[in-house]
Image: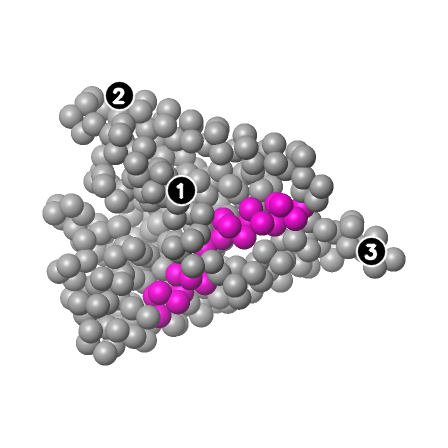
């Protein structure tokens, strides 16, 4: 009886195990496969990126490179799933490797602690892997604001969107999305965010993230400051440089009661991004608060998923 239940729901059991493993046994970055892949993708980007070429070349080069990378990796994984004795367990392993949340939380809390202790130089150095922008001249509130924004966006994309796609399209879909985010992350370390070379990836990721990011934003909005969140989405989120980002930052800004967004420096150039909210600047104490808000959203959607699975048994 028990063995039949396990066999019939092995895919869901593997899904839950993957979530628990990421939560309690996150892989360290220096031996995580993503670190190796990021290094490879960065080398590919440096090889094909030519800033003096035409816009058409930038679009074509980025599209072909990302398509080639996806094709090679996904073909290998599809073959492994095809010949695996327990493909459900392999799918759970793929999900575990695609998820990234707990490790980011730990780093963010450590940076916030350093800022609170007025160790700004160390905090800047530790925050560099988390931030795409230049951090050398950031003030203490600037470090925390950039950190909170990165924490929100990375958790949304590398956890919530990954799970959404995994449940909708399976492990191959989740892996394809995660590879695209890793490619973008690797290329952005050396390429300005307004480069035409990054535009194809931005468009694809925007389309993929459109629904799950908004669902997460509405979940956070429903938990606290709902009216203020809707006001911020209307006046800031819809007019942000990227509306997916605008929605989630708007609801988190209203939930925390702090100001997010604003100008950022990339490769020595200042980008005048919209400020969200007119409240106080964030402090180190706001980092554990936003982590708690994201955890509440995580528990809420996990309960929904478990409820749906239970209803299937009835």
Q: Is residue 149 left or right of residue 51?
A: right
Q: CA distance from mark 1 to mark 2?
A: 27 Å
Q: Residue shown at 18%/47% (left/top)?
A: 266
Quadrant assignment, res 169? top right
Q: Is residue 5 left or right of residue 262?
A: right
Q: Which residue is the site of mark 2?
A: 56
Q: Which residue is the site of mark 3?
A: 3
Residue 44 visible here = yes
Where does the image place residue 132, in percent across and percent down from the top left?
A: 26, 50
Q: Nearer the viewer, residue 224 or 122?
A: 122
Q: Nearer the viewer, mark 1 or mark 3?
A: 1
Residue 272 visible here = no
Q: Nearer the viewer, mark 1 or mark 2?
A: 1
Q: Residue shown at 32%/22% (left/top)?
A: 60
Residue found at the very far front of the displayed protein:
31
Q: Which mark is residue 37?
A: 1
Task: Give the secondary structure at mark 1.
Answer: helix
Q: Is residue 96 one of those drawn in magenta? A: yes
Q: Nearer the N terminus, badge 1 or badge 2?
A: 1
Which range is magenta? 88-109
- Seen in the picture, residue 109 relative to 269 is either above or below; the reply is below
- Seen in the picture, residue 246 relative to 45 is either above or below; the reply is below
């Amino acid at each position: 009886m028990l063995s039949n239940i396990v066999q019939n729901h092995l895919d869901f059991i593997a899904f839950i195990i993957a979530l628990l493993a990421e939560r309690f046994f996150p892989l360290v970055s220096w031996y995580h496969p993503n670190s190796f892949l990021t290094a490879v993708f960065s080398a590919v980007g440096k090889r094909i990126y030519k800033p003096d070429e035409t816009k058409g070349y930038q679009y074509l080069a980025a599209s072909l490179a990302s398509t080639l990378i996806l094709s090679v990796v996904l073909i290998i994984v599809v073959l492994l799933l095809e010949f695996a004795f327990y493909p459900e367990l392999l799918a759970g392993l793929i999900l575990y490797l695609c998820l990234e949340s707990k490790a980011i939380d730990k780093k963010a809390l450590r940076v916030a602690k350093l800022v609170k202790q007025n160790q700004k130089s160390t905090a800047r150095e530790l925050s560099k892997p988390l931030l795409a922008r230049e951090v050398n001249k950031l003030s203490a509130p600037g470090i925390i604001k950039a950190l909170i924004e990165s924490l929100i966006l990375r958790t949304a994309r590398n956890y919530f969107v990954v799970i959404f796609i995994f449940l909708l399209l399976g492990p191959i879909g989740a892996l394809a999305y995660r590879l695209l985010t890793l490619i973008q992350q690797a290329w952005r370390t050396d390429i300005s965010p307004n480069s035409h070379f990054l535009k194809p990836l931005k468009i694809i990721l925007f389309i993929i993230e459109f629904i799950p990011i908004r669902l997460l934003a509405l979940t956070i909005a429903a938990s606290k400051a709902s009216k203020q969140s809707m006001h911020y989405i209307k006046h800031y989120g819809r007019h942000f440089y990227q509306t997916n980002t605008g929605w989630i930052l708007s609801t988190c800004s209203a939930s925390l009661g702090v100001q997010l967004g604003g100008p950022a420096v990339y490769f020595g150039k200042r980008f005048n991004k919209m400020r969200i909210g007119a409240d106080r600047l964030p402090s180190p104490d706001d980092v554990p608060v936003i982590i708690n808000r994201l955890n509440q959203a995580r528990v809420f959607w996990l309960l929904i998923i478990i409820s749906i699975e239970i209803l299937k048994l009835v």
